[in-house]
Image: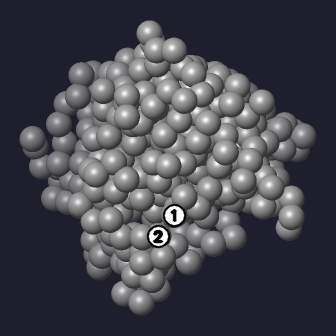
């Protein structure tokens, strides 16, 4: 699942920030500062690399990166859009 | 500091080594360089090709440390500023990819003529990796160390814009221009501002269509790539280019060093960084690798 892959990336990449948190799908990543600016930069690169999607700059908004569910939804939307050609 | 016979150069001791800092190249377009000269005759030389923009500042300390480490091992090392950068002549708007490579080649000639070394290796970081690759391709078999190299320059420009967008998102940017507005500024005004660093149109245009693999060329040589990341996976673009090189007969590898460098970001992520430990590991690894390469070939 996309959620599990994203969670795995966050746990490895942001292990100290995520320590002691229950990294559920609806955990507020930005609000609780698990992911900062640099982290978001790395996360976007990971999503493009891992899922073969292109994240546009206008999609870099909190609604798309607030939680793991938000991120997974964005990736699914991008995959669906790409599949339609 | 003591002025040498050539008053364009000043020298000072640096441990057992000496640093000659000064200008070289044509009078109307001088480049500034710092040449680390080891005690005794240098056995080989290393040219350091710096990154540009915010990356230059981030990497400066590591380059100095690497040069010192290599000089301690008997190698002459030249660090230099490209035209339009640092102390060198000309303007930042004069920089293109070709000018960067020309400057590196001129620096290589200066390194060789002032120290007498024949055998040389190259080190490049980020966009400087592309420059080092292009310069190394002109020297048969020259070993190449690349720190966090830019594999495709179009992604470098895109990352620059993205870093600004993300900074605006977190409220730390001073100017929240959209990516479209930045590209429009690049097209119409000839530059765009990324965290206070102007990126000029001529440079961006000159990078289009280039790639790290293309600049290195097909002639096999030792290449050692260092990826800095907290995650353990080797990035796909680095893994792919290393695989391609291996198939061409290169002795190529990618080594991950655990850490985090906030390329492009001004101060962001600083709490996540351990700059001294990271610098030491990257420098030690690179110096060890380069020493093996230069000593093994200088004995043959």
Q: What chain letter is assigned to the residue under label 2? A: B
Residue B146 placed where, x, y %? Answer: 58, 40
Is residue A15 toward the left or the right of residue B241 in the image? left
Residue B285 placed where, x, y %? Answer: 53, 21
On the rendered image, what quadrant is the N terminus of chain B found in? top left
Task: Specify whether residue B115 is in view.
Answer: no
Q: Which residue is mark 1?
A: A58
Q: Nearer the viewer, residue A83 or B47?
A: A83
Q: Which residue is mark 2?
A: B179
- Taking the view exactly as shown, the residue that stands out farthest to the left is B1
Secondary element under disc 2, as helix, strand or loop, is: helix
Q: Are marks 2 and 1 in contact (CB under 8 Å)?
A: yes
Q: Residue at x 84, y 44 (%)?
A: B244
Q: In whole angstroms, how far apart are the C-alphas of marks 2 and 1?
A: 8 Å
Does residue B31 lie above or below B111 as drawn?
Answer: below
In which quarter of the view is residue A23 placed? Answer: top right
């Amino acid at each position: 699942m996309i959620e599990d892959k994203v969670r795995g990336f966050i746990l490895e990449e942001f292990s100290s920030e995520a320590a002691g948190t229950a990294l559920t799908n609806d955990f507020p990543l930005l609000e609780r500062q698990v992911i900062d600016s640099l982290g978001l930069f790395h996360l976007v690169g990971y999503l493009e690399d891992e899922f073969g999607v292109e994240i546009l700059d206008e999609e870099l908004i909190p609604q798309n990166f607030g939680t793991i569910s938000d991120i997974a939804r964005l990736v699914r939307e991008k995959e669906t859009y790409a599949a339609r050609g | 500091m003591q002025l040498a016979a050539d008053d364009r150069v000043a020298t000072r001791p640096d441990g057992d080594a000496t640093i000659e800092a000064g200008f070289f190249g044509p009078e109307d377009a001088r480049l500034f360089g710092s040449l680390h000269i080891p005690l005794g005759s240098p056995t080989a030389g290393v040219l350091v090709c710096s990154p540009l923009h915010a990356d230059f500042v981030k990497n400066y300390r590591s380059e100095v440390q690497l040069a010192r480490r290599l000089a301690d091992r008997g190698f002459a090392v030249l660090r230099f500023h490209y035209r339009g950068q640092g102390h060198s002549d000309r303007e930042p708007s004069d920089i293109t990819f070709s000018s960067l490579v020309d400057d590196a080649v001129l620096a290589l000639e200066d390194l060789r003529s002032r120290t007498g070394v024949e055998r040389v290796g190259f080190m490049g970081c980020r966009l400087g990796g592309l420059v080092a690759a292009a310069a190394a391709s002109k020297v048969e078999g020259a070993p190449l160390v690349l720190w966090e190299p830019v594999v495709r320059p179009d992604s470098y420009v895109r990352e620059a814009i993205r870093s600004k967008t993300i900074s605006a998102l977190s409220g730390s940017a001073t100017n929240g221009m959209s990516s479209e507005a930045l590209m429009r500024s690049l097209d119409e005004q000839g530059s765009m501002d990324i965290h206070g660093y102007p990126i000029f149109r001529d440079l961006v245009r000159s990078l289009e269509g280039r790639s790290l693999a293309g600049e290195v060329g097909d002639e096999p040589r030792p290449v050692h790539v260092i990826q800095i990341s907290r995650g353990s996976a080797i990035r796909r673009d680095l893994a792919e280019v290393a695989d391609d090189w291996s198939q061409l007969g290169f002795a190529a590898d990618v080594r991950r060093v655990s850490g985090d460098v906030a390329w492009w970001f001004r101060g962001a992520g600083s709490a996540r960084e351990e700059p001294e430990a990271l610098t030491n590991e990257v420098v030690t690894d690179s110096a060890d690798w380069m020493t093996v390469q230069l000593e093994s070939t200088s004995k043959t």
